Image (tube, rainbow, N blue to C red):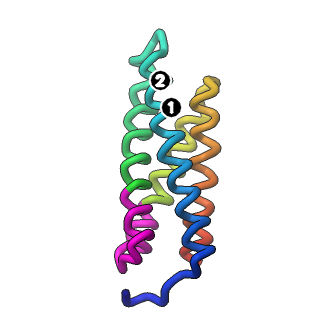
Amino acid sequence: MTNSPASATQNQTVLDALNRCVAACENCISGCLGEEHVGMMANCIRLDRDCADVCALVARLVARGSEHAKHLMKECVEVCTKCANECAKHNDTHCQQCAAACKACAEACRQYLG
């Protein structure tokens, strides 16, 4: 690894946030698909999918100490922020929980990046 390794505590903090975000996004997808007007939730579903996938990938890279983790984490912050903003537009509990998890994940990633 070309960067100095993060502390175990720092790694665990960001891993927890990433994994909570993945779970919240997956839950939001399921909730949105169950909405009466699911077509109106298409953008939310798309962002949830992208966010869950990016967070899962970054979590795997952090866990293995990959030199690519920090580079991709910058994208993760961007996707989490977009997903949080979209989900925050909807009053559904699953969307509000997802927005909170995405916002927390973006913040945890920013702190990890320094």
- Residue 20 located left or right of residue 70: right
Q: Which mark is residue 32?
A: 2
Please provide the residue range marked out in magenta: 57-75
Q: Quadrant of residue 69?
A: bottom left
* Amino acid type indicated by mark 1: Cys
Quick check: marks 2 and 1 in contact, CB under 8 Å?
Answer: yes
**Quarter assignment of residue 109:** bottom right
Dot 1 alpha-carbon crowd within 10 angstroms: few under 14, some 14 to 19, many 20 or more = many
Along the horizontal axis of the image, is 24 left or right of 3?
right
Label 2 crowd (10 A; few <14 / some 14-19 / many >=20):
many
- Residue 36: give x, y in percent of width and height: 47, 9
Q: Residue at x 45, y 59 (%)?
A: 76
Note whether 49 is above or below 79 in the view shown.
above
Q: Secondary structure at mark 1?
A: helix
Horizontal and vertical percent for residue 23? 50, 42
Rendering coords of residue 53 (x, y %): 37, 49
Name the image quarter holding residue 108.
bottom right
- The image shows residue 71, relative to residue 21, as above or below, that is below
Inspect the image, locate mark 2, and give the three-letter code of the amino acid beneath it.
Cys
Image quarter hosting the N terminus: bottom left
Between 17 and 51, the one lying in front of the other is 17
Which SS does the magenta portion mostly show?
helix
Question: 47 and 59: which one is in front?
Answer: 59
67 left or right of 35? Answer: left
**Residue at x 43%, y 69% (from the top left corner):** 63
Q: Is residue 67 magenta?
A: yes
The residue labelled by disc 1 is 28
Q: CA distance from mark 2 to mark 1?
A: 6 Å
